[in-house]
Image: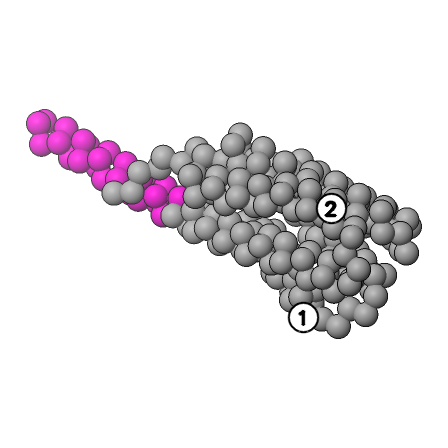
């Protein structure tokens, strides 16, 4: 019989799958797309951040309705939307501002992933994925901060695309793995209920025989 021994089952698996899918799509656009200038690259990143913000905001509303944890989704949505707004208003034709914003975004996102990996995740696979994604984000932040010397916008776009690809793949794996956990946990609970009923039935039948 399966034993219910999980202390943490992530209820946000679908949002991670959606985030991963969006990140992978934009990663391919950044790596293989024909981005002719810096502003086009920034516009693509803004679109990515806004879509991510919508996914996180929707996840927060859904989990609020379901009376589940929503604060993480709200924080992620705020980070995405604030970064997008700053890039839209101040990042066009301004390489230093754009680099600083993207550096802050990837660093903050990475630190949040590391935080959740160590403090809110019990499953070792989940923890490894979250910490790995967070470490990559933190490292990417420092690389972006030193990428202002890139003369070719395609170099920067492709570099950021590789980061998005890594984020997308890890998010997809995390979401799918957590979905399997939810299914396994439901099966374990069902088996536990059946075992309890059988045990109760045996006790009742034993009492009848003694009488």
**Could you tell me how far apart the alpha carbons at marks 1 and 2 are, in whole angstroms?**
23 Å
CB atoms of marks 1 and 2 within 8 Å: no
Kindly identify which residue carries mark 2: 146
Which of the labelled discs sits on residue 149, or is there none?
none
Dot 1 surroundings within 10 Å: few (below 14), some, or many (20 or more)? few
Q: Is residue 83 left or right of residue 76?
A: right
Q: Where does the image place residue 176, in percent across and percent down from the top left?
A: 49, 54
Q: Residue furthest left?
A: 210
Task: Pick whichever, 113 or 136, lies toward us.
Answer: 136
Q: Is residue 10 left or right of residue 34?
A: left
Task: Pick whichever, 129 or 14, lies toward us.
Answer: 129
Residue drawn where x is 40% and y is 44% of the image: 185
What secondary structure do most residues of the magenta stretch adopt? helix
Where disc 2 sits, the SS reads loop
Residue drawn where x is 74% and y is 64% of the image: 154
Tell me where the magenta segment starts and ends, as one range: 185-211
Kindly identify which residue carries mark 1: 32
Q: Where does the image place residue 112, in percent across and percent down from the top left?
A: 63, 36
User: From the image, which quarter does the N terminus lie in?
Assistant: top left
Where disc 1 sits, the SS reads helix
Q: Where does the image place residue 63, in percent across and percent down from the top left?
A: 63, 43
Q: Quadrant of residue 168?
A: bottom right
Q: Where does the image place residue 85, in percent across and percent down from the top left?
A: 85, 48
Q: Is 88 within the magenta? A: no
In this rendering, does residue 67 appear at all?
A: no
Q: Is residue 25 left or right of residue 199?
A: right
User: From the image, which quarter does the C terminus lie in?
Assistant: top left
């Amino acid at each position: 019989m399966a034993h219910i021994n999980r202390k943490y089952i992530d209820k946000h698996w679908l949002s991670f799958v959606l985030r991963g899918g969006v990140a992978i799509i934009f990663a391919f656009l950044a790596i293989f797309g024909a981005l002719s200038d810096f502003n086009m690259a920034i516009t693509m990143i803004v679109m990515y951040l806004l879509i991510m913000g919508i996914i996180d905001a929707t996840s927060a509303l859904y989990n609020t309705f379901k009376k589940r944890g929503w604060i993480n989704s709200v924080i992620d949505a705020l980070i995405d939307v604030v970064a997008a707004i700053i890039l839209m208003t101040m990042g066009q034709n301004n390489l230093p501002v754009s680099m600083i914003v993207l550096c802050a975004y990837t660093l903050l996102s990475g630190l949040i992933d590391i935080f959740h990996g160590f403090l809110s995740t019990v499953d070792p696979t989940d923890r490894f994925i979250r910490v790995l994604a967070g470490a990559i984000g933190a490292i990417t932040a420092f690389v972006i901060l030193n990428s202002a010397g890139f003369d070719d916008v395609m170099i920067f776009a492709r570099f950021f695309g590789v980061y998005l690809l890594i984020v997308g793949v890890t998010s997809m794996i995390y979401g799918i793995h957590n979905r399997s956990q939810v299914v396994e946990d439901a099966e374990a609970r069902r088996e536990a209920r059946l075992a309890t009923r059988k045990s109760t039935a045996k006790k009742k039948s034993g009492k009848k025989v003694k009488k």
